Amino acid sequence: MLKLAVTGASGRMGQRIVALGHAGDVFDVEAALEHEAHEQLGQDIGTIVGVGPMGIHLEHQINKKVDAMIDFSLPHSTECWLKYCGEHKIPLVVGTTGLSDEQVELLDETAKSIPIVFAANMSLGVNLVFKLVNQVAKILDDAYDIEVDETHHRFKRDAPSGTAMEIARQIADGKDWPFPDCLVHGREGGDCLREEKTIGMHAIRAGDTVGIHNATFSTLGETITLHHTAHSRDTFVRGALHAAQWVASQKPGRYSMFDVLGL
């Protein structure tokens, strides 16, 4: 059994990572972590996530040796865990979105000493969409207008989502367009005609929507849409757990879910 630490353990994703990791036969959840002012510190994480007492308490520091860490927290917390894992040689899976350029640079630097899987989305279906939009973008000419839209729950902080940004990045790569300069975020005003070689980006926040992403390629006469709907967070959780199992035996470096899934 691999010893696992989970950051952001009381969040929506963190709770499901703890629950499914605990229920499986690959991991022992050894540490559940949150920020030092969290109101549930000291409580049994199993009780918090609804699986019954696990004997592991929610803490803001880790004092155990683990084989891998999964981080779904906030950018400033991810920065701290990158430094910690680098110092203690702990393989890391990062699913936090909204990282600054400086934080991504820190991730790349840390990946020189430990293996890190960094992905905007860890579901198999979404990663297939990443591959497909890149291929479609290469095949279609510039007569096709391209729009990316996403919908998430009302509590999501960053917009557009990391997944939507990765879809757009894959399209821009397929088109050989400059990224992110080719993006147009929303439209407002009396003169919003499309410009050539741009990707429209749109974010909707509503209710408890888990995640919906669309990439639309449209020209005069036809429209092609690649669509993905996540029915529950568990699809992301299973991908993250699979990534943690995979990264635990890898050499230092920055990896994507394409590497984990062999795409």
Image (cartoon, rainbow, N blue to C red):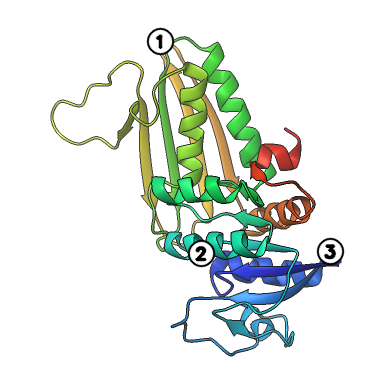
Indicate the amino acid at tag 1.
Ala
Residue 7 or residue 122, whichever sits in front: 7
Residue assigned mark 3: 26
Q: Which amino acid does label 2 sit on?
A: Ser
What residue is drawn where x is 53% and y is 50%? 107
- What secondary structure is marked by label 3? loop
Image vertical order of residue 75 relative to residue 224, above or below: below
Q: Where is residue 63 in the image (x, y as percent from the top left)?
A: 65, 79
For label 1, the residue is 143
Quadrant placement of the C terminus = top right
Q: Answer few, some or many: residues within 10 Å of disc 2's Cα (few below 14, many 20 plus, some between 14 and 19).
A: many
Q: Position of residue 50 (x, y in %)?
A: 67, 81
Q: What element carries label 1?
A: loop
Q: Position of residue 152 (x, y in %)?
A: 46, 53
Q: In this view, does 224 lie above or below 100?
A: above
User: Does residue 166 appear in the picture of this structure?
Assistant: yes
Q: How many marks?
A: 3
Where residue 62 sits, quadrant-wise, is bottom right
From the viewer's perspective, is 261 left or right of 73? right
Q: In this view, does 129 lie to the left or right of 105?
A: right
- Is disc 2 placed on a helix, strand or loop? loop
Where is residue 3, by image quadrant? bottom right
Q: Which residue is denoted by mark 2 in the rendering?
A: 73
- Circles 3 and 2, Cβ within 8 Å, touching? The answer is no
Q: Which residue is drawn at 42% across and 63% down?
A: 76
Callout 3 environment at 10 Å: few (<14), some (14 to 19), or many (20+)? some
